[in-house]
Amino acid sequence: MPAKKTMLRPHGAASKKASIPPDIQSTRGVKTWKDATAWLRARGIEDIECITPDLAGVPRGKMMPTSKFTGDTSLALPSALYRHTISGEYPEESGQFRYEPRDSDLKLVPDLSTLSVVPWETDPTAQVICDVVGSNGDQVSYTPRNVLKNVMRLYEEKGWRPVVAPEIEFYLVAMNDDPDYPLHPPKGRSGRSILGGQGYSIAGINEFDELIDDIYHFSEKQGLEIDTLIHEEGPAQLEINLRHGDPIELADQVFLFKRTIREAALKHGIYATFMAKPMQGQPGSAMHIHQSVVDMETGKNIFSNPDGSASKEFFHFIGGMQAFVPKALVMMAPYVNSYRRLTPDMSAPVNNAWGYDNRTTAFRVPVSNAAARRVENRLPSSDANPYLALAASLAAGYLGIVRGAEPTEASEGTANEGSVELPRGLLEAVSLMESEPALGEVLGEEFIGLYAGVKRGEFETFMQVISPWEREFLLLNV
């Protein structure tokens, strides 16, 4: 692979109006409800969107006038919201999957540190990400943000703090309102559809210069920080890299970035898609996750010894990734389409190997100094809910450290030449997740049962669709 080239643009702090008091000039987030009221008033915000991710990572919530939001209004959503499939259907009860008998309300609790404007709206609008609690105020264990928070608490109890940096790939595609027709790349500023083989091409990025300008502009207005942007191997396939930081904050950013990129693309008459495999014969889209762990007291990376060598925790973390990521893969590859990406010879790892600066392995250790020693998980696809993908990946590493899991030897050559070492489909992945007791311990049994039931429901819906392949090869031949 060629040396990585990046597309950098200035995107410093947004300009601040002199009339806005210093304590509420922040583009993103406030500390108190009093500050929130002043922040909204200073910007003339008329409406606010109170949003939270469902199991698929789709924003759900309520929109209301600002005066109602700051007036001690109780916000509620039905519990069934976390029991429907990506197509909006409600599966039959099976295994540990059950509906709440009363379909009672869950309460939305705004996290004021996420307050920001919605820059693509014509009327002054703000948004805030909400946590979800029960009617008595208790945390709801199965909601995505809470699943990740629970994993974070496990690290905190050991005196550790995970640090992550996601990389999100996506395709730009021409608008297509008929799902029976294949997707194809949009036309760029040259008037021609961009072709594949444009990895790290600056010219490929420049084909969509105005769209990328809007992505940066929208991101700046929301206080979202892009580290780099590149063109990937697929036609009109881009990748955005985010700066490393706290897993909850980075999951929030991915959650908002997906929405931001879709809105920017729609403004230019094209689609942005995070499907794992949107076009046949082209590379899939991944969400690679770089991970390290620091000591909360010293701030030192626990993956490195004082002399700069790799620590035992580093190798145990990798051992945990190898032992548990395949069993939690359904949280990183959540749809039937996700497994079309995880196939041989399509630029994605289909193994359980690790190696130093080896992109053919599932778990790559990039070249770095001791302070930045980290493990890149290359298995998650960009269709994954970022909260759940991060929770699963960090949970696997945590289990490896606390259980002293030993990794295999590092792969020196190509790791993708053998048989596929991962689940080959959605149902197999669901069964593997359910069969591992350790995942229930760290992610919550209620979440495992609920998530498995939804995924089985999605598979049954998929099986009702007759594909072009079946019509082409079975219609007259069997």
Image: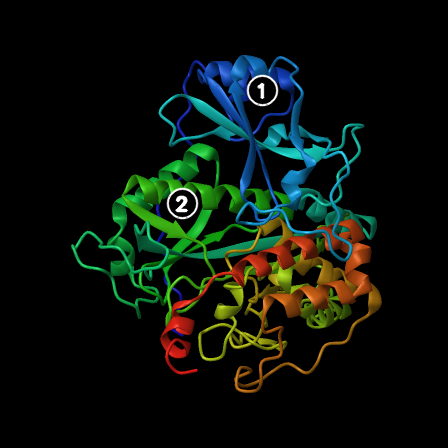
The residue wearing badge 2 is 261
Horizontal and vertical percent position of residue 101:
77, 38
Residue at the image point whose x is 43% and y is 41% from the top:
260
> In terms of secondary structure, where does tag 1 sit?
helix
Decide: is 158 above or below 46.
below
Question: Which quadrant would residue 410 be assigned to in this image?
Answer: bottom right
Q: Is residue 194 visible?
A: yes
Q: Is residue 305 left or right of residue 367?
A: right
Give the CA separation, mark 1 to mark 2.
26 Å
Relative to the observer, which residue lies in front, 407 or 310?
A: 407
Q: Secondary structure at mark 2?
A: helix
Disc 1 packing (10 Å; few <14; some 14–19; many ≥20): some
Residue sitting at x 42%, y 32% = 221
Which numbered disc, 1 or 2, marks the residue closer to the eye? 2
**Relative depth, front residue between 98 and 270:** 98
Residue at left 45%, top 54%?
A: 274
Image position, residue 332 (x, y; %): 60, 60
Location of residue 474 in the rendering, given as x and y in whole percent from the top left corner = 42, 77
Q: Is residue 133 above or below residue 231?
A: above
Graded by Cα atoms within 10 Å as few (under 14), some (14 to 19) or many (20 or more), the crowding at tag 2 reads many
- Indicate the amino acid at tag 2: Ile
Question: Residue 36 bears which disc, if any?
Answer: 1
